[in-house]
């Protein structure tokens, strides 16, 4: 499932992303998603596990609130 978020970039970063989109023939969202997952896969296992645990707890809290 994909969710829509809004990001604010500097002019330089926005221009770079636009340029990459043109030369790679990819949309900007795909470039950002690919870059995120590349970064994520390079992170320390403890950090990834901690963030995964935080996300699981957040989902449990959301589900409990929905069921109230």
Image: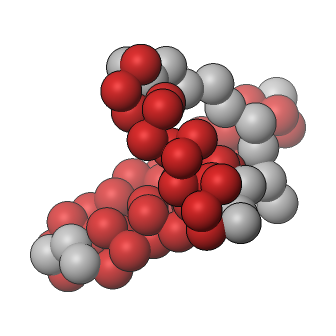
Q: Position of residue 23 (x, y in %)?
A: 60, 62
Give the left or right position of residue 35, taking residue 68 as reference: left
Please tell me which residue is depicted at 20% across the width and 66% down the height of the picture. 47
- Camera-side residue: 7 or 45? 7
Q: Please name whichever residue, 6 or 55, is drawn nearer the observer in this view of the structure.
A: 6
Left or right: 63 in relation to 8: right
Residue drawn at x 37%, y 20% as measured from the top left: 10
Does residue 14 appear to the left or right of 63 in the view shown?
Answer: left
Examine the rendering and report whether any part of residue 53 can be seen: no
Quarter of the image that includes the C terminus: top right
Q: Residue at x 43, y 61 (%)?
A: 36
Does 45 sit above or below residue 30?
Answer: below
Q: Find residue 65 and report its horizontal and vertical position in percent.
A: 73, 31
Q: Is residue 8 shown to the viewer in this render?
A: yes
Check the image and tell me how it is coloured: secondary structure
- Look at 21% across and 72% down and name the residue there: 43
Residue 3: quadrant of the picture:
top right
Q: Where residue 21 sits in the image (x, y, percent)?
A: 63, 54
Question: The N terminus lies in which quarter of the figure?
Answer: bottom right
């Amino acid at each position: 499932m994909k969710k829509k978020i809004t990001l604010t970039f500097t002019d330089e970063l926005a221009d770079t992303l636009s340029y990459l989109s043109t030369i790679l023939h990819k949309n900007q969202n795909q470039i950002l998603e690919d870059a995120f997952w590349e970064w994520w896969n390079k992170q320390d296992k403890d950090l990834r596990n901690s963030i995964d645990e935080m996300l699981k707890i957040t989902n449990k809290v959301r589900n409990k609130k929905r069921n109230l």
